[in-house]
Image (cartoon, grey):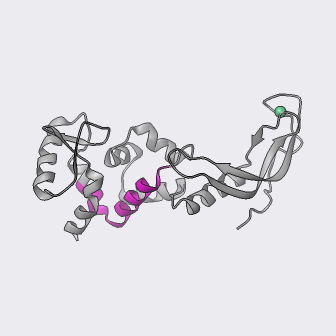
Amino acid sequence: MSQPKPKESLHGEMCPICAKGHLQLVCANYEFNPQDEPAVDVPDVWVERCDQCGERFFPAETSRYLEEFIAEKAEQLTPDELERIRENLGVDQTQMSEILGLGEKTYHRWEKGTQFPSRSMCYYIRVLAQFPEASEWLRERGWRRSNRVAQVVSALTFEDQFPDLVKTRGGQRGRITTGTFVVNPARGLSRVAFALK
Ligand SMILES: [Zn+2]
C-alpha cells in the first residue's frame, strides 16, 4: 500500500507557522503514536513541509489515507466506519456516547478523527454493530451516571442475569455501581449478545 500523490496541495504557499518558509509537497515517513497503543509507522505519505521551520501539514487526501492505514494496522475503526455503524444503530453521537459509557466529547473526537478509540473499544463497537439488539438493551437500561435509579435497577438485573461477571471495587467512568461493587457493562456484552441470540 502506498499513497498516490495528492491532486490538491498547498505546495509553494507561505508557511502559516513561521511566515518565512514555503511549503513543499514531499513524500516522507510518518509515525503515529496513539495513547496506550503501540506506535504505527506509515511509510511514504505525502506531506507539505515548510522548508524553513520544518512544520508538517497534511493534504486532505493524506489525512484520509493515514486514517485508513492506521485503522487497518491497529485493527481500529475509521471515522467513516464509526459514523456508519452509529447510523445503522439509529442513534446520534450523544446516545452513542451513553451506550459506550463515554464522555460525549470523546466520541465526537473519534468521528472527527482527531482521536482514535482503543483496540478493545473497537472490538466492543464491532460487537454492537453485529448485535444491534445489544445496543438497544444497553440504551434502554440507561447506563448514564445522571440516571442513578435506572442504573441501580439495571445493575441489579445485570448481576442477576450474569452473576459470574468480573466485579471490581472502586468507581470509574462508564461503570455502574451496585453497593460496593462495580460492574463493567462492556465485560458482559458478548454474553448479552449471546443471550439475545
Ligand atoms: Zn515554516
| Quarter of the figure that contains the N terminus | bottom right
Q: Position of residue 58 (x, y in %)?
A: 73, 46
- State left or right for residue 183 relative to residue 12: left
Residue 80 within the segment the image draws in magenta: no
Residue 7 location, quadrant: bottom right
Residue 114 location, quadrant: top right
Residue 107 location, quadrant: top left
- Looking at the image, which is closer to me, 68 or 13? 68
Q: Residue at x 15, y 52 (%)?
A: 158
Q: How many discs appear?
A: 0
- State left or right for residue 9 relative to residue 167: right
Q: Position of residue 95 (x, y in %)?
A: 34, 45
From which residue to which does the magenta span run? 117-137
Q: Residue at x 71, y 51 (%)?
A: 30
| Quarter of the figure that contains the C terminus | bottom left
Q: Is residue 33 visible?
A: yes
Q: Is residue 87 visible?
A: no
Q: Position of residue 131 (x, y in %)?
A: 31, 65
Residue 124 within the segment the image draws in magenta: yes
Residue 31, above or below 169: below
- State left or right for residue 72 relative to residue 142: right
Give the quadrant of ligand 1: top right
Q: Position of residue 169 (x, y in %)?
A: 22, 40
Residue 143, above or below 75: above
The residue furthest bottom is: 197
Q: Main secondary structure of the magenta part?
A: helix
